[in-house]
Amino acid sequence: MVVDISAPPRAPEPGPGPGPEPATKGRLKRRPAAWVAMYHSVSDCPDDPYNISVTPARLDQQLAWLARRGLRGVSVRELLAARALGAERGLVGLTFDDGYADFVTAALPVLRRHGFTATVFVLSGRVGGENAWEPTGPRKPLLDEDGIRRAAAAGMEIASHGLTHVDLTTAPEDVLHSEADDSRHRLAALIGDDVEGFCYPYGRIDERAAAAVRRAGYRYACSIAPGPAGCGDFALPRIHVGQADTPVRLELKRRLARVCGRALEAS
């Protein structure tokens, strides 16, 4: 579940990229800002009260639009590694929140067809369960252990969305700690690899939540809108993508990303 406040209408590591663009009139020209797309469920479900679903056909159309523009969808881990080298040009981060089971059955085939990767934010306390945190709408199954391992084996980044999908900004200290720390250790044990990323449930973040995620040992965290000043890579903004986002709407969102604070500035 997500509050959509967007503006309206392990793959090979990237090699060294070009350095900063030449200065113009004594000022350093900014590199094109990278951006991160936020998806949730990929299904043909018509009952979608929270605007969290795209059909496989729409996802295919959206990824084809990226490819036609010479862009490649990658996990957040890969995007940040490229950014550290000044080589993020041509990359777009792709994220899928909540870890729906349809990621493996519906999203993964489309991603592989385009040669893209993505980050899947999994709720490690609800593995094999369903989206019980949503008060209304259809019940959707979440990835089980086998599904999570299949996604990781296909080159997708597995990252944490907490344990149970609670608002960390209102959680007591013990819950905040377990949602951030325990979820990371559970996922790492499941996939046999480090878990570098976190995603704040509902996109809600404050200084306390960001500090807890940083202490838990993550290297980055995704929100929706930019977080409190000083959070840096622990409040990476994203652009919500839904069923209504045709190529025209995606182009508008791309152009507005920096203006609306939804782009990743150069590190």
Image (cartoon, rainbow, N blue to C red):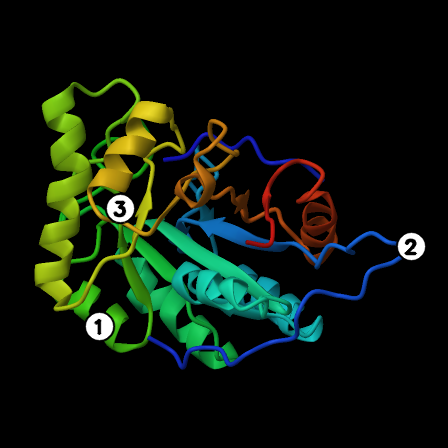
Q: Earlier in the sequence, mark 3 or mark 2?
A: 2
Q: In the image, what residue occupies the spot 22% across and 48% down?
A: 217
Q: Earlier in the sequence, mark 2 or mark 1?
A: 2
Would you identify the image quadrant in which residue 256 lies?
Answer: top right
| Disc 3 from disc 2: Cα separation | 55 Å
Q: In the image, what residue occupies the spot 60% across and 54% down?
A: 266
Q: Is 13 displayed left or right of 218 in the figure?
A: right
Q: Which residue is mark 2?
A: 25
Disc 2 on helix, strand or loop?
Answer: loop
Residue 248 or residue 44, whichever sits in front: 248
Residue 150 circle label:
1
| Disc 2 from disc 1: Cα separation | 51 Å
Q: Which residue is mark 3?
A: 140
Q: In the image, what residue occupies the spot 66% across and 70% down?
A: 19
Q: Nearer the viewer, mark 3 or mark 1?
A: 1
Q: Earlier in the sequence, mark 3 or mark 1?
A: 3
| Disc 3 from disc 1: Cα separation | 19 Å
Q: Are marks 2 and 1 in contact (CB under 8 Å)?
A: no
The amino acid at mark 3 is Lys
Q: Are marks 3 and 2 in contact (CB under 8 Å)?
A: no
Residue 188's spot in the image, x, y percent? 14, 59
